[in-house]
Amino acid sequence: MNSLIRAENVTVRYGENIVLTDVSFDVQAGDYIGLVGANGSGKSTLMKAILGLVPIEKGKIQYSGVGRGHTGIGYLPQVAVTGNTLFPAEVREIVGIGLLGGKKFPKRITKNDELAIESILEKLGILGLKNKKIGDLSGGQQQRVLLARAMVSRPKLLILDEPTSALDPRVRSEFFALIKSINENDGTTVILVSHDLSSIKRYSKKMMVLDRELVYYGSSAAFDINFSMARGLHHHELND
Ligand SMILES: Nc1ncnc2c1ncn2[C@@H]1O[C@H](COP(=O)(O)OP(=O)(O)OP(=O)(O)O)[C@@H](O)[C@H]1O
């Protein structure tokens, strides 16, 4: 099997606070993994460890076909989508930021970059928004723009940290379906952090449950929601 990422006994702490203990797992090419866990269970920290954004105290993460840090990995960080109508940047500029990471100074958007931006906007069904200001868009549209920014460099692995928390249930389902099609049609490997347990179970292939240690990693079909509720994922989090 082709492992993109192999984590072995990963332990991470912030000062005295041990947030992850001995977490081990493999991410295979083509996986769509839903990562769930109660507030503070270490989900964002684990994603940051994969991205090389937090130091690993013990254990290691090996990469194959993607690099530590952002090479080959698209990242949509945990953000609260707000209707900030004062934020002046246009959609095409925001998506273009996703192409700047790999460039040397001076960082400029080229004609080819413009084509890549148009192509990802079209794929995500938002080409018509290209010249709009992000602050003028709905939460669901803004989230697609941020997804476009994470995907414009054609990453092999997409890490999405709670991309749907600010969306209403209908737009949220559309977003989950979009990610599923990206996974199935393009073969992009996906790790998606969410509190929406029922959607995750429905759309992802595998589930990972964290409670500062790994308490479940296996197929979503075999995942028992009652089990996770006993681990502190309470009912309100299923629907929030
Ligand atoms: N930069 C940091 N410095 C110190 N402590 C941190 C830092 N980031 C997170 N923590 C702590 O680490 C623990 C795990 O946080 P993390 O954000 O990984 O959890 P999470 O599962 O993503 O939570 P949530 O569902 O609330 O987003 C929490 O106790 C948090 O307070």
Image (spheres, rainbow, N blue to C red):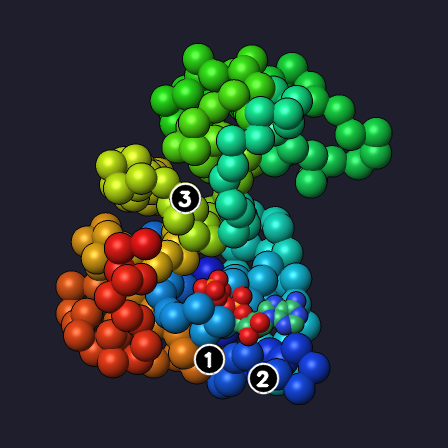
CA–CA distance between discs 2 and 3?
29 Å
Query: Which numbered marker is on residue 198?
Result: none
Quadrant for the N terminus in the image: bottom left
- Ligand 1's quadrant is bottom right
Instruction: For the C terminus, give its image quadrant.
Output: bottom left
Q: Residue at image x 26%, y 74%?
A: 228
Q: Residue at x 51, y 45 (%)?
A: 80
Camera-side residue of 20 and 170: 170
Q: Is residue 93 visible?
A: no
Q: Amino acid at mark 2?
A: Ile
212 or 96: nearer the viewer: 212
Label 2: few (<14), some or many (≥20) within 10 Å?
Answer: few
Tag 1 near tag 2, CB within 8 Å? yes
Q: Is residue 18 left or right of residue 103?
A: left
Report if the beta carbon of the residue with label 3 is closer than 8 angstroms to ligand 1: no
Q: Secondary structure at mark 3?
A: loop
* Kind of residue at disc 3: Ala
Where residue 38 appears, as percent x and y from the top left, is 39, 70
Q: Nearer the viewer, mark 3 or mark 1?
A: 3
Decide which of 14, 168 is in the foreground and name it. 168
Identity of the residue furthest to the right in this view: 106
For marks 3 and 1 on the same chain, the one whose residue lies earlier in the sequence: 3
Spatial CA distance of label 1 from label 2 is 8 Å
Assess disc 1: are there few (<14), some (14-19) or many (≥20) residues with their C-alpha within 10 Å of its C-alpha.
Answer: many
Q: Which residue is mark 3?
A: 166
Residue pointed to by mark 1: 212
Q: Amino acid at mark 1?
A: Arg
Establish whether ligand 1 lies closer than 8 Å to the Cβ of label 1: yes
Can you tell which mark lies on residue 18?
Answer: 2
Please state the horizontal and vertical placement of residue 74, each as a whole percent of the image.
53, 46
| Residue positioned 37% across, 63% down in the render | 35
